[in-house]
Image (cartoon, helix red, strand yellow):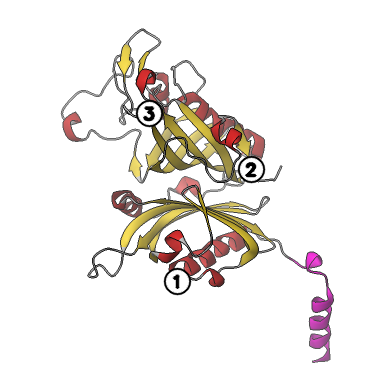
């Protein structure tokens, strides 16, 4: 009894900085669950928030408890974690349920989210949330069941890439897509696959009026195809209408699993940027006819300096909008920024 009391007194007297406040993979994932539980209960006090916590939702700074804190009513079934233990950053892509207009729909409407938490001393000091209010996107993810096995498999120790190389290679994806000309170095594995809002956007089977027709040839087509591989899409030069990929923030890096989670904006400027020539001279008109911005979270699985799997969560935002975490100059810049704080 005396020994137990002595230990308790000793711990109480030990400065907080000397106590074990580290947060491993299990701790980071548990913290995400704590946040989501508090979120659906509409109760910020139920999450381990710091007194000065910063919260943004779809790029807007809000006080905890406002915005979707008021409307989320349940958790979905799709759950994908990105745990950056070195930096104390927890990433999450998953589904939720939001209050439905019809009172008969008690389970709520499915929505898709991407989330980043900064965890310091086991408390949440930053919350960055992207909500995609697209029921089909959420249902697409839930139809996938569990996340693809590549997102949870460990890379052999001798094959792991450094944090810097993970970011460098992932950023080649954005640089290769921005005003794509088909002439860049595109670091994809032969079996690379990309999913956007839960739907396959590479190596896809024919859909709609594609059924029964020959597979488009990347060397002669005038519009890029979801039937092509990652490399074929980029080498076609037909993604040129993506005018600018900016505010490229790399927010969680998991060296053990070869994962990089990024937040960014894709600008389509419209007008003259819709008209361009491919490397072999084909004259193309493609892309949105009005200024258009996608706000997105994009997750990469990398192996041996190549991208093997991509999962993106995206929604339209006001053209030129910032993330709420960058200066205006950085928000308009297309340079890569590792904002995790770990090196």
Q: What residue does disc 2 label?
A: 339
Residue 162 seen in this snapshot: no
Residue 74: give x, y in percent of width and height: 38, 66
Q: For the residues labelled 3 and 2, say whether their Cβ atoms are less than 8 Å apart.
A: no
Does residue 143 show up magenta in the picture?
no
With respect to residue 190, does 29 lie above or below? below
The front one of 295 and 155 is 295
Rounded to the nearest whole Å, what is the CA distance between mark 2 and mark 1? 30 Å
N-terminal-most mark, 3 or 2: 3
Disc 1, SS: loop
Identify the residue at horizontal 42%, vertical 25% (top origin).
231
The front one of 341 and 11 is 341
Q: What residue does disc 3 label?
A: 229
Looking at the rendering, the stretch of residues picked out in magenta corresponds to: 1-20
N-terminal-most mark, 3 or 1: 1
Residue 88: give x, y in percent of width and height: 65, 54
The front one of 267 and 97 is 267
Does residue 19 show up magenta in the picture?
yes
């Amino acid at each position: 009894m005396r020994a137990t009391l002595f230990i308790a007194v000793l711990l109480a007297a030990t400065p907080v900085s000397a106590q074990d406040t580290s947060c491993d993979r299990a701790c980071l994932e548990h913290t995400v669950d704590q946040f989501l539980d508090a979120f659906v209960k509409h109760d910020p006090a139920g999450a381990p928030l710091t007194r000065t916590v910063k919260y943004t939702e779809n790029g807007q700074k809000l006080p905890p408890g406002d915005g979707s804190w008021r409307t989320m009513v349940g958790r979905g079934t799709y759950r994908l974690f990105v745990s950056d233990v070195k930096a104390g950053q927890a990433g999450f892509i998953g589904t939720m349920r939001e209050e439905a207009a019809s009172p008969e729909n008690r389970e709520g409407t499915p929505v898709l989210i991407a989330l980043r938490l900064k965890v310091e001393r086991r408390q949440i000091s930053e919350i960055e949330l992207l909500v995609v209010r697209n029921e089909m996107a959420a249902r697409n993810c839930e139809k996938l069941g569990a996340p693809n096995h590549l997102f949870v498999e460990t890379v052999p120790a001798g094959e792991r890439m450094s944090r810097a190389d993970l970011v460098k290679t992932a950023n080649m994806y954005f640089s290769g897509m921005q005003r794509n000309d088909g002439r860049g170095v595109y670091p994809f594995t032969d079996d690379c696959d990309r999913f956007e809002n839960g739907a396959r956007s590479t190596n896809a089977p024919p859909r709609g009026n594609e059924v029964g027709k020959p597979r488009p040839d990347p060397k002669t087509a005038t519009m890029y195809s979801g039937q092509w591989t990652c490399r074929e899409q980029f080498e076609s030069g037909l993604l040129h209408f993506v005018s600018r990929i900016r505010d490229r923030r790399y927010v969680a890096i998991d060296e053990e699993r070869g994962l990089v989670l990024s937040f960014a904006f894709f600008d389509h400027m419209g007008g003259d940027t819709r008209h361009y020539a491919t490397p072999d001279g084909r004259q193309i008109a493609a892309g949105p006819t009005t200024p258009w911005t996608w706000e997105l979270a994009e997750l990469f699985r990398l192996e041996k300096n190549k991208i093997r799997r991509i999962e993106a969560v995206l929604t339209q935002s006001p053209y030129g909008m910032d993330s709420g975490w960058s200066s205006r100059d950085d928000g308009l810049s297309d340079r890569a920024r590792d904002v995790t704080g770990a090196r």
